[in-house]
Image (tube, rainbow, N blue to C red):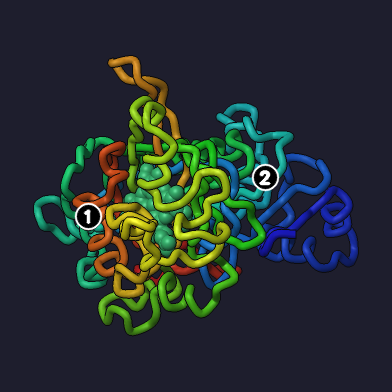
Amino acid sequence: MEAGLMQVGRRGFLGLAGAGAAGAAVALGAQAGLGQRRTGAPAAGMYAFEGPHQAGIVTPAQDRMYFASFDVTTRSRERLVALLQDWTRAARELTAGREVGGGTLPYADPPADTGEAIGLPASGLTLTFGVGPSLFTGADGTDRFGLGGRRPAALETLPHFPKDHLDPSRSDGDLCVQACADDPQVAFHAIRNLTRLAFGTAALRWSQLGFGRTSSTSSSQETPRNLFGFKDGTANLKAEESGELDRHLWVAAGDDPRADWLAGGTYLVARRISMRIETWDRTSLREQEGIFGRDRAQGAPLSGGREFDRPDFTATSRDGAPLIATGSHVRLAHPSQNDGHRMLRRGYNYTDGDTSLGRMDAGLFFVAFVRDPARQYIPLQNTLARQDALTEYLQHTGSGLFACPPGVGPDGWIGEGLFA
Ligand SMILES: C=CC1=C(C)c2cc3[nH]c(cc4nc(cc5[nH]c(cc1n2)c(C)c5CCC(=O)O)C(CCC(=O)O)=C4C)c(C)c3C=C
Ligand SMILES: [Fe+2]
């Protein structure tokens, strides 16, 4: 079984409702209460909502994603807090495969849950929440909710990078929710219901559907492929590397004296990267492999060996040229070129139909989690934008940076520490 995934079947659930349930079912009951589960189907995968860190970061990447960014429309701090509490309550239900609002159906009112996930299991749903820089400081410099003094120094709108072509209506936001699941309808249902709960307090600003994970976050997972056909996620930071996670992923107490509320949390970088698929498809395999610095079939470094072997950047061909080219993606992105920095990538392939020129509007919705974006993301993105051979085939069209608070305990709510 994958790390952190609980298999809760009909027997487990019925057992919980009865006398003494153990193991997974107890975990379900403790965190989710005894509301109506949407299905009695066996072997419904479920990740614990509670824990020191939010789920959806190091839990194994699911097959589907629906990412949403929100603008907070209220000026009231109390209403913002109430929204985060409502979202936490709903997230406990949704991730346990239960209907929002306990499945209440007063006939004279709209149902508490929108209903399209009835009959579907939890499907490994995780919900990961974040806060953007604009939640702290408005465009006119105002301290919107009295949180200005608690804003982490690293939580700034990402700078403009060379060749960026950002659409403001697909960028930034006050709050974000990343919903990942093995069923797209379950991920959609989660965002829809959270959006509905936010009515009058926060409004959807932009959203992105992703259909195929482009990273492994656990060594138990097979490396998937991106839309250029290459294995993606080979050298990713993985859940099993606990020391490395503390070093590169989780914010520690003392990292930022203004923002100890973020200890145990992390930063989420989102980039909507359009990929020039038609041009790529007219490029030779030799050139494609040279651009990445890995072979397409196995994902092995061009210096030799197998997928998970270390790339040898000193290896040269008979004519003295480096086997992994100086402008290749893996050389430029490798920790040895970036002061030892790593990141946890958790992106998804996407398509939004086609463009007015009849090209596929498709690419990578790049999501990465880092302990410090100012050191781990911004310098690397500047390097890639200027030197990476891959850049010719890409266009960054959306962007966002969010701080993801730590996870919650049984009575906690997301972002509690920020408002304490
Ligand atoms: C700024 C960070 C990065 C962006 C943006 C980015 C875009 C991007 N990447 C691929 C495909 C691959 N990336 C791979 C490795 C890799 N990429 C980054 C960072 C960014 N990529 C890092 C830190 C690494 C790991 C480097 C290392 O430690 O060796 C690979 C190789 C396989 C792997 O390790 O995952 C591929 C393939 C695309 C298509 C893309 C934009 C659309
Ligand atoms: Fe990459």
Whether label 2 touches label 1, CB < 8 Å: no
Residue displayed at 66% across by 60% down: 220
Q: Residue 301 at x, y = what percent?
A: 47, 57
Indicate the position of residue 38 as horizontal and vertical percent values: 72, 40
Who is closer to the viewer here, 167 or 329? 329
Query: Crowding near pointer 2: few (<14 within 10 Å), some, many (20+)?
Result: many
Say which label, 2 or 1, has the lower sequence index.
2
Please state which of residues 187 and 373 is positioned toward the viewer in this rendering.
373
> Who is closer to the viewer here, 287 or 36?
287
Q: Residues within 10 Å of mark 1 (few under 14, many from 20)?
A: many
Q: Specify the farthest residue to the left.
A: 140
Residue 373 image offset from top left, x and y in percent: 29, 64
Quarter of the image with the N terminus in it: bottom right
User: Is 125 on the left or on the right of 402, as rendered?
Assistant: right
Please identify the quadrant where the C terminus is shown: bottom left
Name the side, left or right, on which 415 lies relative to 30: left
Residue 79 can be seen in this image:
no
Q: Is 92 in front, or is 398?
A: 398
Residue with the most extreme bottom position = 254
Amino acid tagged 2: Ser
* Residue tagged 2: 123
The numbered mark at residue 158 is 1
